[in-house]
């Protein structure tokens, strides 16, 4: 397997693009590939003040590295959920994010739910109905709330998350099996800002997980390799397994699944999304002031109302 | 495992309905279950002249038996595609359909593509680009064309096909992975009649494959047990395997996937379907007179235009 650009030994073969590249050309190619998507969707520009959500894993550190190399003005946010489970998961992940930021002289902010709200995610999930004693079911809710609040308070222009194509395809498959129109209506790589919500973008949404991992390894980025110990309950991981099997048999199926879905939205599928956006703009949580469509406490504040 | 109705030994446990039944109560339950769907969707009434597409397999013979027991006025149509592949697949299947009809004194019509068009499906697929030497890719096209033509010529009120829930869920999954809005817009169990198209209904669309098989076996219906020798190329069978695995882990997931999809359609998820119906009504194939949206020969007549 040879690099298509220079004929040297390739380090990666991307079957869905029919493209093999050597280390040097891959490390050039991926940032260009990401930059094209940033431009195509007008995600942000060099004038923007960008907040990157970082977990200490390969995706967020690889993406942050790329944005840094591309010259964007970024700061990081690490959310410490207090996950221990005998492997000090949260603290070790935070250390990777911290070292990455220090090496590049980039600002990293830390939100810590144990410090700020008095409980770890495990404790909250054990106490609440919504948590059902499964921390995994609260993770997205808590992270979204904290990221959005932090980004609004800090007057950033845009919030970047490092969801990769494998994440997006797995979430899409799970949402499709449920046909939850509300979720299906907001799977695009850019969620525009609206009252109470910062603009959210996913520059890695066409980057396969293995491409992000290859980039991190080739750039010698130290990252957290363990899966979250609570992810055994994760729907997303459950469906990733199947998408991987299909990808083996039909290279590119994940990318086509996701891109065809974006075309379907563009062609008028899921038109209800406008209404739900309208509703959201009007109603605010009396506790934290963030938007909610329940008419009372938002889902996050409800977690602490049950105490 | 005991029958919920009488406490006798159960012959089937339907986890998605949390219902176990003995032979007698199952043979009562399934026709009632089907009848409820017929009524809910106003599929047809006792005054209608019904054409049932029969393949000689468990689904179509079980369904025809149920419609016959329920007192509907039905005739069968068997389409002989000339599939041999050393096991005389088509002729053996036809024999099962024929014996079933004779035993119940029901009319069975035979369409034979070798007789009527001079070639078997294998021969057509070997000769045509569309066939790509894979008969499986032509099967649906040919059967739909012949069924629709036969049903219109015979002035039936409605065409019944025996697609079961496993079929519908697998087709839905394949169509969703492609996000083909045209197909996603017409997955409902009733396709109303429109100019050039007979009303088409699927009374088995909420009946699991194993429920249809159990019914056929308990009623001592002899049916073709072999899979079609060409189905190795079938996308539908490929995805059925995964849906079966998910169903094992999450009983009822096939049913929920299908029902939530029907709700999504009802909630306006695929608003383009009205337009495509409008287009179809206007254009006709100059060869056979059936509707087509290509503006020239329909896909079926094109197969014979390449000779």
Image (cartoon, coloured by chain):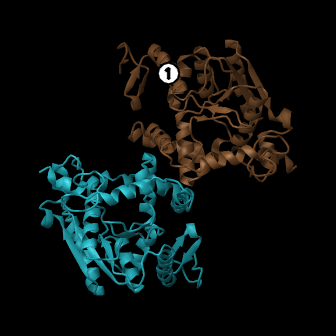
Chain colours: A cyan, B brown
* Quadrant (top left, top right, bottom left, bottom right) of the N terminus of chain B: top left
Q: Where is B161 relative to B28, above or below? A: below
Of residues B296 and A68, the one nearer the viewer is: B296
The percent coordinates of residue A206 (x first, y second) are 48, 68
The percent coordinates of residue B239 (x first, y second) are 54, 45
Q: Is residue A281 left or right of residue B163?
A: left
Q: Residue at x 48, y 15 (%)?
A: B28
Of residues B220 and A270, the one nearer the viewer is: A270
Task: Find numbered disc 1 in the image and state the secondary structure of the residue it sits on.
Answer: helix
Image mark 1: chain:
B
Q: Where is B61 relative to A22, above or below? A: above
Question: How many labels were placed on the picture?
Answer: 1
Q: Is residue A108 left or right of residue B132?
A: left
Residue A231 placement: quadrant: bottom left
Q: Is residue A46 visible?
A: yes
The percent coordinates of residue A224 (x first, y second) are 29, 70
The percent coordinates of residue A195 (x first, y second) are 33, 66
Q: Is residue B200 left or right of residue A68?
A: right
Q: Is residue A85 visible?
A: no
Residue A2 placement: quadrant: bottom right
Q: Is residue B19 left or right of residue A30?
A: left
Q: Residue at x 73, y 38 (%)?
A: B195
Where does label 1 land, which residue? B30
Q: Where is B93 relative to A232, above or below? A: above
Callout 1: few (<14), some (14-19), or many (20+) C-alpha neighbours within 10 Å? some
Q: Where is B143 relative to B222, above or below? A: below
């Amino acid at each position: 397997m040879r690099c298509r650009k220079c004929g040297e030994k390739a380090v990666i073969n991307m079957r869905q693009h029919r493209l093999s590249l050597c280390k040097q050309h891959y490390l050039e190619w991926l940032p260009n590939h990401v930059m094209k998507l940033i431009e195509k969707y007008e995600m942000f520009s060099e004038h923007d003040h960008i907040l990157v959500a970082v977990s200490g894993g390969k995706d967020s550190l690889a993406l942050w590295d790329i944005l840094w190399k591309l010259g964007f003005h970024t700061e990081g946010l690490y959310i410490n959920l207090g996950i221990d489970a005998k492997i000090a998961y949260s603290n070790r992940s935070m250390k990777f994010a911290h070292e990455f930021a220090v090496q590049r002289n980039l600002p990293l902010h830390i939100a810590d739910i144990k410090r700020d709200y008095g409980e770890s995610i495990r404790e909250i999930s054990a106490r609440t109905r919504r948590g059902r004693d499964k921390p995994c079911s609260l993770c997205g809710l808590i992270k979204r709330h904290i990221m959005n609040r932090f980004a609004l308070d800090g007057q950033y222009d845009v919030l970047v998350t490092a969801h990769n194509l494998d994440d997006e395809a797995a979430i899409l498959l799970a949402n499709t099996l449920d046909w939850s129109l509300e979720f299906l209506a907001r799977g695009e790589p850019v969620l525009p800002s609206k009252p109470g919500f910062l603009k959210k973008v996913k520059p890695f949404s066409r980057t396969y997980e293995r491409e992000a991992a290859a980039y991190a390894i080739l750039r010698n980025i130290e990252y957290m390799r363990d899966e979250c110990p609570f992810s055994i309950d994760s729907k997303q991981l459950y469906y990733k397994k199947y998408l991987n099997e299909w990808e083996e048999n039909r290279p590119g199926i994940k990318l086509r699944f996701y891109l065809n879905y974006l075309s379907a939205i563009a062609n008028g599928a899921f038109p209800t999304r406008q209404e739900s956006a309208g509703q959201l703009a009007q109603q605010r949580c009396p506790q934290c002031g963030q938007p909610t469509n329940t008419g009372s406490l938002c889902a996050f504040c409800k977690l602490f109302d049950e105490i």
